[in-house]
Image (tube, helix red, strand yellow):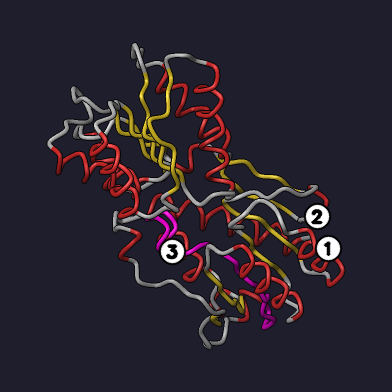
Amino acid sequence: MKKVFCLLLTLCMVLSLAACGNNGNNGNNAGNNTNLPQDSGTNEPSDSTTGGELITVGVINNDPNESGYRTANDAAMRATFTEENGYKATFYNNNDAAQQIATAQQMIQDEVDFLLLSPASTTGWDTVLQDAQTAGTQVILFDRMLEADESMYAAAVVSDMPAEGTTAVDWLAAQGLSEYNIIHIQGHMGSDAQLGRTGALDEKVAAEATWNYVTQQTADWDEATARTITQSVIDSGKPFNVIYAENNGMARGAVAALDAAGITHGKDGDVIVMGFDSDKWAMEAVLNGSWNYMFIKPAVFRAIIS
């Protein structure tokens, strides 16, 4: 149990550093996606850190190209879970849930002490969790939640995605528009982030006659795809006054289409622009008035210890 608490505290620090340390680079230019498990370095740890015994950790994360936050998150994980710090870590990054699941099962067979999991999908993990319990592997969820009884994992340090969606929709409602014509650009379908950020908006659109979807499409976290979606709406001539993009990269893609068409946005503009996560460049866009809203990711976290 002591190891669980120590690793949990380390993970909390890693998530905070990833959010605060994001230097504003576009996640699409990260260039460090890993499609196969990679071991950490080979330097020996100090005896004062681990007593000479390495803690083995398998890290299943999402593609670092997904967003600026994810790029920083992956970098912080790799900088923290090193042999110098007392860990022997294997990393796997992919947005395909089936491949994540297969790799997690292999890590359990390799008898890792801990499996750190940021699932690409909220479902499909029952066998992995059961196998981990049988093998004595401690599962800790980070950033993203999955659908499972709390007894099936040791702890979770995750973003409260439904709260993020509710906060964003409440802010949008407070703007008092006479009509909301929304371009809704979704993230990876079935992920905790997409479900949470979509859910509150879906409820509002269903409940309010003045709230309408001009389009609702997934860009799968991709900036270029978000630009294409927005350009298609512009070309159609349909009126819109809100861009609700489920991460900052997709919001930036949408804004590029607005700029190319000469459509004003942000403070005193014709279109409200909304994004999510913790990119410094996006915060600057809000501060300079070219965007209206960005949800700062670490503002709503929840920790669960089973």
Q: Quadrant of residue 161?
A: top right
The residue at 70%/53% (across/down) is 123
- Give the secondary structure at mark 1: helix
Q: CA distance from mark 1 to mark 3?
A: 28 Å
How many numbered discs sit on the rendered protein?
3
Q: Are marks 3 and 2 in contact (CB under 8 Å)?
A: no
Q: Are marks 1 and 2 in contact (CB under 8 Å)?
A: yes
Residue tagged 1: 130
- Give the secondary structure at mark 3: helix
Residue tagged 2: 152
The residue at 75%/61% (across/down) is 2
Residue 258 lies in magenta, yes or no? no
Q: Which label sits on residue 64?
A: 3
Look at label 2 and name its amino acid. Met
Q: Earlier in the sequence, mark 1 or mark 3?
A: 3
Look at label 1 and name its amino acid. Gln
Part of the protein shown in magenta: 51-70
